[in-house]
Image (cartoon, grey):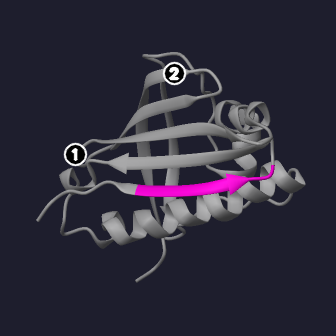
Amino acid sequence: MTDEPIVVEQVLDAPINKVWEALTDHTKMKSWYFNILDLQAVPGFEFEFYGGREDRQYLHRCKVTAVEPCRKLSYSWKYEGYPGESFVSFELLNESGKTRVKVTHEGLGSFPQDNADLAKENFREGWNYIIGTGLKNFVEQGPGENIQPKIPSK
């Protein structure tokens, strides 16, 4: 079985600088992503957050690996107490005043395959929701209720 990355793309009706700010300002991320206490778009910066189902939360440990302001943000993604490491990249492209966001999440096959919470399909559903609903609503309509993603119960 190949470990193909998950790729999710969405065109947002917002300028790149607004989308970049939503991706790199931890106070804004609380509204559409996860409650990250601190994030600096600087290679080597480490951050963490909790996420998952309501009955099971996972500590995510991440490290910024690449930054190209208003173009690309990449970081590693691991779970405390579990083997495996994956990598997430957000790429931004200007499309006539709108922004195409491309998220690539690779290395998911390195996570324990016997844990249904870490199944690739959950990541696919999660990224589609995070980008297609959470981030989209945040940059197009402004902050609203907290819509942090949850891992679907199977």
The residue sitting at the left extreme is: 1
Nearer to me, 5 or 115: 5
Nearer to me, 54 or 134: 134
User: Which stretch appears magenta?
Assistant: 7-13
> Disc 2 designates what residue?
67
* Residue 84 numbered tag: 1
113 with respect to 43 (left or right): left
The quarter in which the C terminus is drawn is bottom left
Position of residue 12 measured from the top left corner of the image (x, y, whole percent): 73, 52
* Residue type (three-letter) at the residue carrying disc 2: Val
For the point 62% across and 57% down, the residue is: 10
Q: Is residue 74 above or below residue 133?
A: above
For the point 64% across and 47% down, the residue is: 100
For the point 65% across and 27% down, the residue is: 70
Position of residue 54 measured from the top left corner of the image (x, y, whole percent): 54, 69
Front of the two marks 2 and 1: 2
Q: Is residue 47 above or below residue 58?
A: above
Q: Is residue 64 magenta?
A: no
Q: Is residue 10 magenta?
A: yes
